[in-house]
Amino acid sequence: MTAVRVIKNGISSIIGKMDKHAVFWLQLPFIVLFLLFIIIPTVVAFVLSFTDFNSIQSPNWVGAENYINILTNDDVFAGHALPNTIKFAIIVGVFGYILSFVLAWILAQVPRVPRTILAAMLYLPSMTGPTMMQNVWQIVFAGDKVGYLNALLLKLDIIQTPIIWLSDSNYIMTIMIVVSLWSCMGIGFLSMLAGILNVNRELYEAAHIDGVSNRLQEVIYVTIPAIKPHMMFGAIMSIVNAFQNANIGVQLSGANPTPGYGGQLLITHADEHAFVRYEMGYSAAISVIVLIIIWVISQLSKKVFKDKEAA
Amino acid sequence: MKKVAKAASALLAVLLAIWVAATAVITSAEAGDLDSLAAQIQREYILSDDELAETQLSLLKGAAGSLEFDGGRELAAEEEYEFSLEVDKAGEYWIAAVYAAYEDNAFENQVQVGVNSDVRTVVLPFLWADTRDDLIDRYGNEIQPEQYQLPYSIYYFEEYEDFTRSPIEYELNEGENIITIVPMNQRIKLFALYAVEPHETPDYEEYLAMHSGAEDYSGQAITIQGEYFRAKNDSAIRAASVQNASLTPYSPYGKLLNATDDKANKRIGQELHYEVEVPEDAFYYLSFKFSQPLKTGGLSYRTVEVDGEVPHTGLMDIGFRNTGMNTYENYTAGGDEPVRIYLTAGIHIISIKVTAGPVDGPYHRLIDVIADINETGLTLSRIRGSSSGSDKATDSNRTWDVFQYMPDIIDRTQGWIDELTDIYNELGGLTDGDPSFAADIMLAVQNLERFMSKPREIPNRLNLLNDGSNSAAQLAAKSLLNIYDQNVSFDCMYLHSADEELPSPSTNIFERADASLRQFLFSFSPIMNESDGVSEDADTLTVWVNKSSAYVETMRRITSEDFTMKTGIDVSFAIMPDEKKVTMANSTGDTPDIALGLSYYRPAEFAMRGMALNLLEFDDFIDWYAEEFNLETLTPMAYEDGIYGAAETLDYYVLFYRKDILDSLGLSVPDTWDDVKAMMPTLLSNAMNFYLPLAKNPSYKGLETFSCFITQNGGDLYTADGCYANFSDPNTLKGLKEMTELYSVYGMAQNVPEFFNAFRSGYIPIGVATSEVYVKLKMSAPELNGLWDIALAPGTVVDGEIRRDQPADTTVAMIFSNTKMKDEAYEFLKWWLSSETQIKYADEMITRYGSDYIWNTANLDAFAQMAYPLAHREIILEQWQYQKEILRHPASYIIERSLSNAWIQIVTEGQSFRPMIDEATLVSNREMQRKLTEFGYFDEDGNKLKDYNINIVNDIIAEWEARKEAEQ
């Protein structure tokens, strides 16, 4: 009897001890993974950004030289990558975000079956990823006469000779934006759609009694306030996507750097330095700058969407 | 009700769990037992090689005329030999040759044969056999057997283009007949020629009458395993390991060879010989367990010969219907009314030959239609004045009075439609069904119907006719290969009695589930999960290869059989899917000793960062390398005073041209860029064009696509001190000017993503391209057979000589500097690049994986043995004499990039030449200085500290030549 009791007590005391730190134990898997795949690489990148690591020989400490070079000595950064990124991020981020919301709202108005089908169709491009994107759009923008766009414009007599869209530095940016907008209905769009569908119908009825008279007012006074958390999530996703989907230019044109740096963004600029020029330190410094930019913008959007009552 | 369902599902789950657990126990007990696997495949040949030859020779005993050479007579390649063959009586004869090869290579042995001035090209295949000392490797997989050539090959002269592959009937005179023989690709040894009186193949009734007294066989079925062929007439034929539990032998614990590979046994004329011993004189039924996975709605054909003769017409062109993927079926020769074969007791040779008599007519008619469509298309594009080959667009709103130019165009199109429909119906008639495998023909018909529906727009609708990969002509051509290929895989054949119940050709769902589960469980066994990467063993040489597993598998095998045997050095191979892996491995200190298959510019990049071993450390390197390689190949692998890699494969930039089109335009093959410029007006006025690799990628012009213009003019991309760009040097400028003017002034096509398609339809009948196009033309454009050729790439005249410089380096091998086995690594490198190994490897790749695995070795001695037709081999080797590479530089990328951008700005965007070049110089110089500062050539203030050596390879070549001269 006593032996059983000892074991029983032992087990319950172990459970009791673990219970005390239950929060810790439950979070452990997440903490480990987050440390391993997010925190440590970020810290390493941050440290490397102060070195001249060429990915082969051991890195040398060079202080802030990389940052100084980026800001003072890098024509491509200041002349192409940064302005391109700002343009790309503003158009794709903001318009893509608005587009996601508008489409989500419109979809919420249609019956269930067509809604599911349409939502799947809109969501598909962001899911199938870059390969599909590249295959579809490279045909549309192919530089010969049989490329869809060229064929159409030739037929309508708008152009006389086919335009080599993807290798022309004047067009590549526009094409990148179009393609990115096409594929921006991602997880943020889905979350907003879910949010709109879950708004309590009673709120609308109440609003009508309070004097709301048209759909626009409904959206502004009821829908948006009701789905603020979803809007917030969508905004963050949209910003991150706008900065991260930068590879689209490289994939479309098949070259890094893109022709005439026309579609060069910060991410592709970093990538080029790392794997073409073997300048990992420099590349890490660019990444850190991108990180800072994203963080600042996220803070701004948090300010906008913060749920004041909850805070 | 719910309760019952619940209980049932619970019971099912328990049963499933028990089944899985039990199988797991069985699997763990059975798996890894290599002896029991080996026991399943033990087998010996019945006849020895000599006995086989004797059996075959005895069939020619009754020849009407013969000419024999004791010990054989050597016939050299491309030489004409004359023989005289005597027969007593004038008449029709078949002529058979007994011959052998000198080299164990896989060339198609084409021979030009003239009999009394009736000259034709025939193929005399060599007979091969697989060795029977098969082994199981340690993973339980059966190793592909080695193959060797049999001492004698005996074949009738057969018409190459004839799908029935019956012997040619030659008209011989009484007394002497002159026979001329020209071996086209290689020397052969001729033992004898025989004139044989043709024997008519009897039909089945006659055949039965001939053996009227014979009984039906009544014993047990005799099984012949498909993969145990005694001989084959094409080294590409091989056995495959099919993962299907219904096949014999089969094991879930390893891949046993258990059927013939349908992908390797599909070409008309291929033949497999099986030996079989039957117990009694009797009539036998012949059944096949086969799979025909690809020809939906069509038949694949085989003809059965017994002891060198087709017994009766019922065994000619036996059609095997489509079974679907990985599905096997039984088929008895004769089908619903099975036919029998009379065999005497004893050993017989049963041969299964790929023939396709029934589709011979449709195939050749289709080729004629395609040629006709293409020709009309070219005429129409000439009328229109533009095509996909030219960048000029057509005015699509213009209406054409096409009848003024081509009054019969509608009739012609209708004629093609009728002919194509007729061909399609004929193919359908062979199976009483829809010939889906040739559905492209009907798509072509649809295109043609749309094409002629609006006569006024005909010249604008050439994309429906022959322009591009979806045009009628190319769609029809696509079905050519489907008609030609006769894929069938045989698991086994049975000789059996009338009432024999043959084993089922398929498995039921439980057997399949059991086999899959065992395979799945087996995949967890330790042997399947051994890492093959960096070996822990300090005495093992680690080699990383940037190639697919097909290449690495073969490397691994010939290394262990040859290198490790000879030297005792263990080598472990690993596939490197991405070259960046090397850099990443280096940061964790895990670099291999050697890397193979790297892109040609990697060694220099690694060397600049101290990761590569300087091969000049080995005293004999240059002497050894210069023996069999072109020293110029070293240029991209040089850095400062060292050489950090050795070329492994080369590519060739040669001129491809359409003989038929150039002839019809009255153009000759150009030798220089001036010739090219001179032919441009003719090409353009015929709506055709010229292709250069510069047009392939619209947005990026790689160094290898334009370096030829600079080197041919004697220009250089770097200044003499190697620290600045040298674009304004007069010679460099001349080259740059030429490469932009060809486009901006002479109107070359700027954007040709797929040269092969344009070449095929004839819109770009001439252009400089690489081995990729060569292989495609060989493999997938049967309608162009004999209509195209290659020549040396155009050059620039310098001091009265034509400089045809082109780059060639493709993949290279290198040793890493932190290897602990320097000497062993070097020994391996020398062994791997030696001509014996390279030849052996190239042959293995082709015989095992087919002609598209051609290996363009950089070893020039070895390349002379590669499976190219002799004439093409000579052109490629001569082009390589003109090889000229560009030295790599820490800032090479900026040179490439700024010139590529300049080209796009000048040609695509129409900007002025000189300002763009100046801008490119400026951008390059700035980046070069920045990059060289990183490497210590400049100090912080921009003062130059030292020069970057750009002459290293030239110095090495000069020194080597001086040394050679001194020796003589």
Image (cartoon, coloured by chain):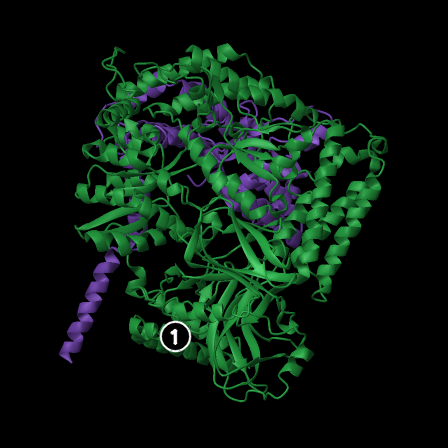
Chain colours: A purple, B green
Q: Quadrant of residue B434?
A: bottom right
Q: Position of residue B456 (x, y in %)?
A: 83, 34
The answer to whether residue B680 is left or right of residue B105 is right
Chain for numbered disc 1: B
User: In this image, B204 relative to A298: left or right?
Assistant: right
| Element type at mark 1 | helix
Residue B716 location in percent, x, y?
A: 39, 17
Q: Which residue is mark 1?
A: B20
Furthest residue toward left: A2
Residue B943: x percent and y percent?
Answer: 25, 10
What amino acid type should be assigned to the residue bearing mark 1?
Val
What's the residue at 33%, 35% (across, down)? B629
Q: Is residue B383 or residue B253 the one in the foreground?
A: B383
What is the tally of numbered marks visible in this picture?
1
Q: Residues within 10 Å of mark 1 (few under 14, many from 20)?
A: some
Quarter of image, res B622: top left
In the image shown, does B699 or B669 lie closer to the viewer? B669
Q: Quadrant of residue A100?
A: top right
Depicted B605 relative to depicted A126: above or below: above
When the figure is inspected, residue B196 is found, relative to residue B454, above or below; the finding is below
- Looking at the picture, does residue B163 appear above or below residue B471? below
Q: Which quadrant would the C terminus of chain B be assigned to in this image?
A: top left
Q: Position of residue B80 (x, y in %)?
A: 51, 45
From the viewer's side, name the closer residue of B727 and B107.
B107
Asked whether residue A245 is in view, the answer is no
Image quadrant holding the N terminus of chain B, namely bottom right
Q: Is residue B422 visible?
A: yes
Q: Residue at x 52, y 63 (%)?
A: B271
